[in-house]
Amino acid sequence: MRITVEGLSWAAAGTPVVRDVGLDIAPGETVGLLGPNGSGKSSLLRCVAGLRVPSAGSVRYGGETIRCWDARRIARHVAFVEQSADADGELRVADVVGLGRTPFRSRWRGPDATDRAVVAAALERLGLTGLADRPWPSLSGGERQRAHIARALAQQPWALLLDEPTNHLDVKHQLELMELLASTEQTVLVALHDLALAARYCDRLLLLHHGRLVADGSPADVLTSERLATVFEVDAGLTTDALGHPSISYRGPLRLSSRSPLEGVS
Amino acid sequence: MRHPARLGIAALALALASAGCSTATGGSSPSDTSADGTAAKATTVSSCGRELSFAKAPRRAVTLDQTSTETLLELGLQNRMAGTANLKTKIPERYRDAYAKVPVLSPKILTGEQLRAANPDFVVAAEAGLYTKDRAGTREELGALKVPAYVSAVDCPRRNGSGRTPFDLLFSDYEKLGQVFGAEDRAAKLVREQRAAVADAAGTAARVKDRPTVVWLYSALNGTPYVAGRTGMPSEMSRIVGAKNAFDDIGENWPEVSWEKIAERNPDFIVIGDLSERGRPGDSASEKRALMEKDPVMSKLAAVRENRIVEIPGIEMDPSVRTVHALRLLADGMKDLGHAR
Amino acid sequence: MPADRISVRPAASAGPAASGTSAPAAVDLLRPAARGITVTAATPPAGSRAALPRPVLVLGIALVLAASVAASVRIGAADVGYADVGRAFGVRLGLDVTPLPPLADSLVWDLRLPRVLMAALVGAALAVCGAVLQAVTRNALADPYLLGVSSGASTGAVAVVVLGVGAGALGVTGGALIGALVAFGLLLALLRRSGPDSVRIALTGVVVGQLFTALTSLTLMASADADTTRAVTHWLLGSMAPARWESVAVCAVVTPLGLTVAWLCSNALDAFAFGADTASSLGIGVRGTRTLLLVVTAVLTSVAVATVGAIGFVGLIVPHGVRFLTGPRHRVLLPCSALVGAVFLVWTDALARSVLAPRELPAGVITALVGVPLFLLVLRRRGAL
């Protein structure tokens, strides 16, 4: 499913957080969303997921604007995974993954065989089958994150929107997850902190800085020393590794620059 | 009382049978003026907005509070009572034997189930507040069950015409109850006695110089004083003996005020309600005296310093057959304190 | 064959359900294109619990409820036998039975039966309201009175009893109902601008509750004499004694309706577990659903409290106890909470009537005294969550 965003702006309590962002994600692409903290990644993702109403601009799924869509219709197109969604209570992993079937369930009937089969498939895909019966509070951070992603997959979505899903995961699970995202046929827009992961697994990268989109292209195009210095305020060198992906070697943080933050390099 | 429902049925059957027998013997004998007479005439009385009809005199009356209990016992009606409830203090000596003959249905407020289980044919209470759904049941509900529910006239002064004093209303209770039970003579005697007592106390008023003000201190729960307002018996008693209730301006029975307010009004003397029988902290008269003497403002009052205090049992300040006793104590107190010659 | 590539038969091929006539295609169920596929292969539920299947559990508790009602009708200051109940029913059905004497009949029919039925209805309503509010506010300590509705009911009741506002037409119940709805209206008005966020609901409810509690106290202090205060305090503690057929009828209509609406929102209630954004992303219209659930809760609680006063603890602990039995999914939790709440209150009311006979204790006292040990037991079994 194609996701198109035009002139998107969003403000929180009067302060602009996302400024005039436009992007176009082709069906099946795996796109990484990068930027330092406070650059507006979460807010942009939420606007694309239909969870926030933008103050300007539009979001389209497959060419159709979602402004008037209700939550259920959106949920049948797009699955969203928050950064660290937590719950009290004794939900089991299977229950949490089962929540992903909500957009397809009518009020009147309970989960049916299809629901159960999809949930089982999602658990298997994320390696959680053995944990299906475990209560939520007993899981580690990484296991919880994987459960959320299994839930998103159980929605059988056309697109996956994920907000820093690799945060609590072991390296192995980080790589497994990124492989999964890269190989699914669904459109993926994933906000990431880890530049190396983004460089390795994403088809395209979007770079946000103070709410504006300052770069949009392949990892090699987007990740340059200059951008790393401007946006992330680090001194780093970039090379290409054996597989052709950009490889970053950090030399150290830069002191606060006196340059205006809006001087972007596109 | 394991199967009071069945007991009730048996009692009802017995009552019907005895009523049948009495009709067969041709009605009450001429010398029979006591309440044990089985007068079978039908009467109707009005009580606080309801007309209560009686095909014959009740034989299973239930009283919902101590005031009503003592009234019926004073009229010698213990053999016509099926139960009492809500006793607050000890029954006076002269009623004790009679009281012992009547089953005590509950030491506290009677519930609807308990009332029905006692199978009454008449219910008597001093205030309408006892006839609510969560207590004995409403007067409408009892009326639908053909059980007349009586409320003391003192509780509804506005329904009884203007210009009648609380004592008038109290005496009208005696007369109405006497009429219902066929004990008119006994009731009339009681009314005469009590009217004389009131007149006697009113005589004091003639000999009173000025009009001393009085504060009736009922209780000081948690240190806050409750005094008599305009609407209860104390105000009326004060008026009869020629005194003035200092809190006549408050239209409640027992409003909560403050020591400062009492001191402000600087009464000439103070009546303390002795509630030692209730037994809660601060209830006895001596504790109330101590409280007043300790209070920085009250202790300076002339009434407190000079011990111008009259003690009256608290229960007698409510409208009941014992109120005239409180009235006499008040009149005697005024004399002792020198307000009346 | 890995579980995510299980055998399915596409729904379109509704031909002879012969096994093995054609090789089943391996399908990736996690693709959106797989949506049209209906799975007929019997997949065991992932992580099947050893718990009882749901219909058995519900039926079991329902039977316990019926037995409790039957037993409780007999308990009280005056013993009532089954024969007496039968006769009371029989007369009204026009059967040829000896009627009970009018007062005994009134005891059974006007007082005892409505009271027990009312206890069941109120217990069910409060338990479900507690469960719903715990999910909506994501707060394990939420109970039906969190919205301040019961404080509003108290103010309404006190206004009628003490100030005599509309006393003739309304009565305590009517006043309490109006007070409750006014308080709820205030809550909604305060939430209008910012929307029913889970924390905001709890805080606003507390504020509204405090306001109306203060108004109640003010009215009592300013105008009531000792007797009225005592009467209202008794009501504030909650008691089944005022229940009559009229109030049971109202409850019997409102409560099942409210419970059904809440049950139909089970999916949404489950989805609220991870917060508003996740719920919204799962297709729940968060604001609308929350408002609907608040309205349902407020109405159920108002009707319950208006007649019998604020009976505490049922709404707080029954959902927790039931969750321990059935798990947190609301499709099962709500019906079971309703039934268990009903059983709980029927028994606590029976205890209130009989433990200190002939005195009658307010039901709210007993629910706390019985509820606390039960609650501690649940906490211990769960490892003191």
Image (cartoon, coloured by chain):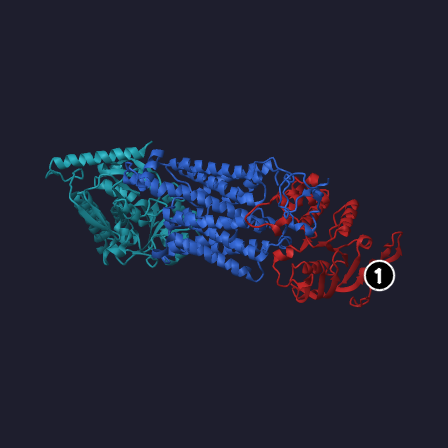
Q: Chain of mark 1?
A: A
Per the image, label 1 sits on a secondary structure element best described as: helix
Residue B111 horizontal side relative to residue B169, left or right? right
Q: Residue extending furthest top? A: B2
Residue B316 horizontal side relative to residue A142, left or right? left
Instruction: Give the residue at x 23% y 57%.
Output: B161
Palette colour of chain B: cyan
Residue nearer the viewer, A124 or C359:
A124
Chain identifier for the red-coloured part of the image:
A
Residue nearer the viewer, B226 or C371:
C371
The answer to whether residue C237 of the structure is visible from this angle is yes
Q: Position of residue A197 (x, y in %)?
A: 80, 52
Q: Position of residue C303 (x, y in %)?
A: 44, 51
Instruction: Give the residue at x 29% y 47%.
Output: B126
Q: Position of residue A99 (x, y in %)?
A: 63, 48
Residue B170 horizontal side relative to residue C335, left or right? left
Q: Amino acid at mark 1?
A: Asp
Crowding near pointer 1: few (<14 within 10 Å), some, many (20+)? few
The answer to whether residue B276 of the structure is visible from this angle is no
Q: Position of residue C291 (x, y in %)?
A: 54, 56
Chain identifier for the blue-coloured part of the image:
C
Q: Which residue is mark 1?
A: A221
Q: Write down the quadrant of residue C82 in the picture.
A: top left
**In the image, residue B140 above or below residue C76:** below
Residue nearer the viewer, C151 or C290:
C290
**In the image, residue B327 above or below residue C84:** below
Residue A251 horizontal side relative to residue A7, left or right? right
Instruction: Give the residue at x 67% y 58%.
Output: A49
Residue nearer the viewer, C204 or A82:
A82
